[in-house]
Image (spheres, grey):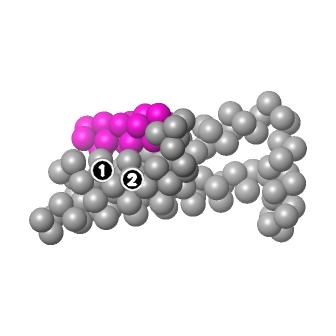
């Protein structure tokens, strides 16, 4: 239950933070929630990964569907990817890794202190 709650809180606060701050606010949000919660290390990583990954997936689709995938197709071509869906998947994975590693860093700092 704490895993789901932490994931949702990371998602919500990252969405709020991205409205006013640069993209790397997701790392700070994940770190703070990783530090504040008493999860196991693996669960902290999963919470950060899913929270930011789902948020970036929603955000990417929110901007990509109305413009009929034009920008994502061009970016996929630029990175030599076969289609735009793979480009979105890579974007979600990179965001998820940033969130997961930040949450893991937060929980590990809590264990050290």
Badge 1: few (under 14), some or many (20 or more) residues near its Cα, within 10 Å? some
Residue found at x 69% / y 38%: 61
Could you say which disc has been placed on residue 64 in the image? none
Q: Residue furthest top?
A: 66
Task: State how far apart marks 2 and 1 are (Cα).
Answer: 6 Å
Q: Is residue 96 above or below residue 80?
A: above
Tell me, yes or no, if residue 46 can be seen here. no
Q: Is residue 88 left or right of residue 39?
A: right
Q: Is residue 92 left or right of residue 39?
A: right
Q: Reply yes or no: does residue 95 show up in magenta.
A: no
Could you say which disc has been placed on residue 32 in the image? 1
Principal SS element in the magenta part? helix
Residue found at x 46% / y 39%: 17
Q: Is residue 66 left or right of residue 97?
A: right
> Where is residue 21 shown, x and y percent of the image?
51, 44
Residue in front for this viewpoint, 55 or 28:
28
Please report contact status of discs 2 and 1: CB closer than 8 Å, yes or no: yes
In the image, the segment drawn in magenta is: 1-16
Q: Is residue 81 above or below residue 61?
A: below
Q: Reply yes or no: does residue 9 show up in magenta.
A: yes
Which part of the image, by quadrant, shows the C terminus?
A: bottom left
> Where is residue 6 shown, x and y percent of the image?
31, 42
Could you say which disc has been placed on residue 28 in the image? 2
Residue in front for this viewpoint, 58 or 36:
36
Residue found at x 81% / y 57%: 75
Tell me, yes or no, if residue 22 can be seen here. yes
């Amino acid at each position: 239950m704490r895993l789901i709650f932490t994931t949702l809180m990371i998602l919500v606060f990252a969405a709020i933070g991205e409205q006013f701050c640069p993209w790397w606010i997701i790392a700070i949000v994940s770190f703070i929630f990783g530090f504040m919660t008493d999860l196991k290390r693996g669960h902290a990583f999963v919470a950060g990964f899913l929270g930011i990954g789902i948020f970036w997936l929603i955000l990417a689709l929110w901007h990509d569907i109305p413009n009929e995938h034009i920008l994502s197709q061009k970016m996929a071509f630029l990175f030599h990817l076969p289609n735009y869906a793979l480009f979105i998947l890579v974007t979600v994975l990179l965001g998820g890794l940033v969130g997961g590693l930040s949450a893991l860093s937060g929980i590990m700092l809590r264990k050290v202190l």
